[in-house]
Amino acid sequence: MKIGFNARFFSEPNTGLGQFSLHLIRSLILRFPDNIFLLYLPDNTPCPDFPGNNWKKNHLPGIRRKNFDRTFTKHPGFLKEKPDVLHIPHLKLPDEKQGIPLLLTIHDLIPAVFLQLKPFLSGKTPWKAISALGLRSRLLDPYRARQATMINTISRCSAKDIARLLHYPEEQIVIIPNGFNPELNPGSSPDSIQSIKKKYGITNRFIINFGGQSVRKNLTRQMKAFCAARKSLSGLQMLVTGEGHWQQKMIKKHIPGLLLPGKIPAEEMKHLISAADLSLYLSLYEGFGLPVLESIACGTPMLTSRDSAMSEILPEGCVFLDPLSTRSISRTLLQLLHRPDLLKEKVRAAQPGLKNYTWERAAEQYMVLYRKTAASASRG
């Protein structure tokens, strides 16, 4: 079988869609050598040198990057060798299917869902941010989504959102969870941990806060809770991953113990997570929740939101909180930092469940779905 894949996000390897595309394609190529994987990219987009000879990179020159998703199936380079199934990994279907069965992966509907969250519209959110998300939410066209032969997503939470907002039968949505980086494990040496702490200015016990600094990540409440906890635990630090925030001016004001290093190389994350006393991931909404897996894999207790998809992923290894309650966050932080042993055993008990979240397992499930998509189109 020839499987086509819109690989535009290879150019953004640090984004969720970039990681999804790179990890899935690599696992598919390795796991299924008897199939051919046709990777379609805008001109000048970098493509990794995957192992094996069962894949082809197809750079399609002459298409503006912003128009690639909708127009690449019209390009002569695409039409020269059409796939049996075409996988579109995000909610931007091509204008013309060319008679090819389409599998559409919708990771989440954050632009539409997030506008419905009351905290987002309560007071201090800049109007430009609301307007931008409003425009993006209007692009979620139920009719276009229905042009796909089959639709899949990565969590039950996202499946329910797709059914509700795109009017698509929930029972027809296939759920395939994402994998996580297999290099994440509790195996960091004391020397590695000491070196990484020195690099990032960590001099005391610390919390690692996942997910960046966008509005949806709920950092303002978490910073307030951290400041309250720090009054009882002098010297406590909190390292926030990612970069960019609509309240950047406020964040730049001196908050004792707060570390904002910006982007962190993937190879250093293992050591930082392993060294942390606790992980925080109290986002207002997520379609999956990869940091939950990463934290448990490294043996670090996780405090996360009881809302959206986080509650689906290894719930036995987490403590769930109301992300809107600063008081609850602060109180729970203090309780667990005073008794770190309370969660360590819980995390260890959850680690066997990580085997359900590998890219190899995801690749096998996607191959089954490619075959079903082809068969469904032939019947229809």
Image (cartoon, rainbow, N blue to C red):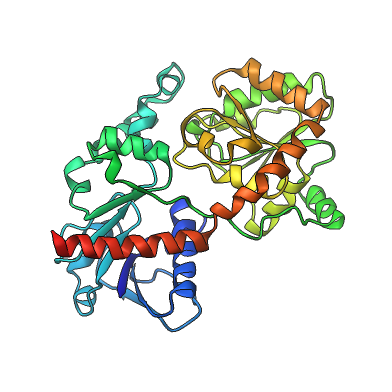
Decide if residue 277 is in sight here: no
Residue at 75%, 48% in the rendered image: 274
Decide if residue 4 is in sight here: yes
Work out whether residue 293 or residue 252 is closer to the camera in this orientation and state it. 293
Task: Kindly indicate the quadrant of the structure image that contains residue 320.
Answer: top right
Residue at 41%, 36% in the rendered image: 157
Residue at 80%, 48% in the rendered image: 197
Q: Residue furthest bottom?
A: 53
Q: Residue 325 at what x, y percent from top left?
A: 58, 17
Residue at 16%, 43% in the rendered image: 143
Up-down: is 309 above or below 43? Answer: above
Q: Residue 37 at what x, y percent from top left?
A: 36, 74
Q: Is residue 67 left or right of residue 198?
A: left
Q: Residue 106 at what x, y percent from top left?
A: 34, 48
Up-down: is 380 above or below 52? Answer: above
Work out whether residue 92 or residue 369 is closer to the camera in this orientation and state it. 369
Task: Kindly indicate the quadrant of the structure image that contains residue 372.
Answer: bottom left
Q: Is residue 158 left or right of residue 186?
A: left
Up-down: is 188 above or below 313? Answer: below
Q: Residue 130 at what x, y percent from top left?
A: 36, 28
Looking at the rendered image, the quarter that the C terminus falls into is bottom left
Up-down: is 56 above or below 343? Answer: below
Q: How many marks on residues?
A: 0
Looking at the rendered image, the quarter that the N terminus falls into is bottom left
Q: Is residue 300 left or right of residue 20?
A: right
